[in-house]
Image (tube, rainbow, N blue to C red):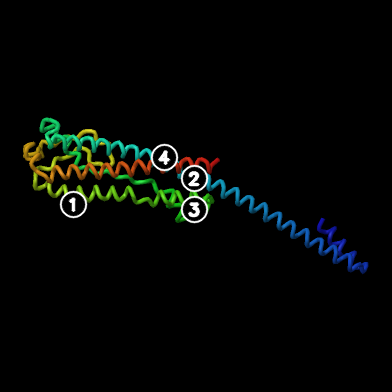
Amino acid sequence: MIKFFRHFRKSLISEGKTTKYFKYAIGEIILVVIGILIALQINNANENYKNEKEASFQLSKLKDNLKADKSQLEKAISTDSTIIENLITCVKVLSNDEELSFEEFIDRFQFIYTTNSFNPTRGTFESLISSGKIELITNQELLETLFAYYNNNTYTAWDSSIKDYTRNTFAPYLLNFDHVPNITDENEGTDFTHFKTSKFSVPSKSIDSYKNDQFIINSLRVKIQLFEGQKIAYNELSKDIDQLIISIENELK
């Protein structure tokens, strides 16, 4: 085919048909340009397909991360509920609104030593940012919502407040007030349903000592308020996750 076109061009030149030659040359150039444009279009189509496929893959990973976060939050919310319930009972006992044996009181009182926190699964999102693949998500509303979720500092403020108050205010006071009991499960975020006091750290104070210590009573109330605030923040975050999952599913469709 190429030889044919060469022979055709030579014949036009040799026959002195310059005008026809130029027309042919222009036509040939136009065909080449059209061919290049078609090739570019095909290449762009292939690139767009690859990008869409990669975007779907990354969105699916984000969805899995969010589902894991949802599960973690549900557990954290349940933990908060258990802690609040037990601390409220302690306040009632110390206020003489409820009666428990000292051993039962101490079992519930030990919840005041606990902290709870939520740690979102950030791997996929941070990898998207560092690799520049975050640009594959073209839905701006979804992108803004993802950034808002992963930069949410409302719940972290409650997490930090609970840890700071427990470690820096309450725990040091208890060290001087009574024996600090050993807790069998020290993992933060665990669903604490019951604690056992070590025989080596049985409280030496009586229930009356706890009732007459205003700092103890106030500390219980403070911890209740902190955990209630954290629980509200976790519930709001859980709703955000639900909306994000729905948005991602719609985008994947």
Determine which residue is flagged by label 2.
59
Q: Position of residue 61 (x, y in %)?
A: 46, 44
- The Cα–Cα distance between marks 2 and 1, rounded to whole angstroms, is 41 Å
- The Cα–Cα distance between marks 1 and 3, rounded to whole angstroms, is 40 Å
Labels 1 and 3: the sequence-earlier one = 3
Residue placed at 87% from the left, 61% from the top?
8
Report the quarter where the N terminus lies. bottom right
User: In the rendering, which numbered label is found on residue 67?
Assistant: 4
Q: Position of residue 170 (x, y in %)?
A: 16, 47
Residue placed at 10% from the left, 33% from the top?
102
Residue placed at 16% from the left, 47% from the top?
171
Q: Do the CB atoms of the residues marked 2 and 1 lie less than 8 Å apart?
A: no
Please name the amino acid that badge 2 sits on: Leu
- The Cα–Cα distance between marks 2 and 3, rounded to whole angstroms, is 10 Å
Horizontally, residue 180 falls left or right of residue 5, namely: left
Please name the amino acid that badge 4 sits on: Lys
**Quick one: label 1, few (<14), some, or many (20+) residues within 10 Å?**
few
Determine which residue is flagged by label 1.
168
Horizontally, residue 179 falls left or right of residue 234, namely: left
Q: At numbered mark 1, what does the secondary structure look like: helix, strand or loop?
A: helix
User: In the rendering, which numbered label is found on residue 134?
Assistant: 3
Q: Do the CB atoms of the residues marked 4 and 3 lie less than 8 Å apart?
A: no
Quarter of the rendering containing residue 201: top left
Labels 4 and 3: the sequence-earlier one = 4
Q: Please, which residue is most extreme toward the right here?
A: 15
- The Cα–Cα distance between marks 4 and 3, rounded to whole angstroms, is 20 Å
Horizontally, residue 250 falls left or right of residue 167, namely: right
The residue nearer to you, when weighing 51 against 228, is: 228
Report the quarter where the C terminus lies. top right
Q: At numbered mark 3, what does the secondary structure look like: helix, strand or loop?
A: helix
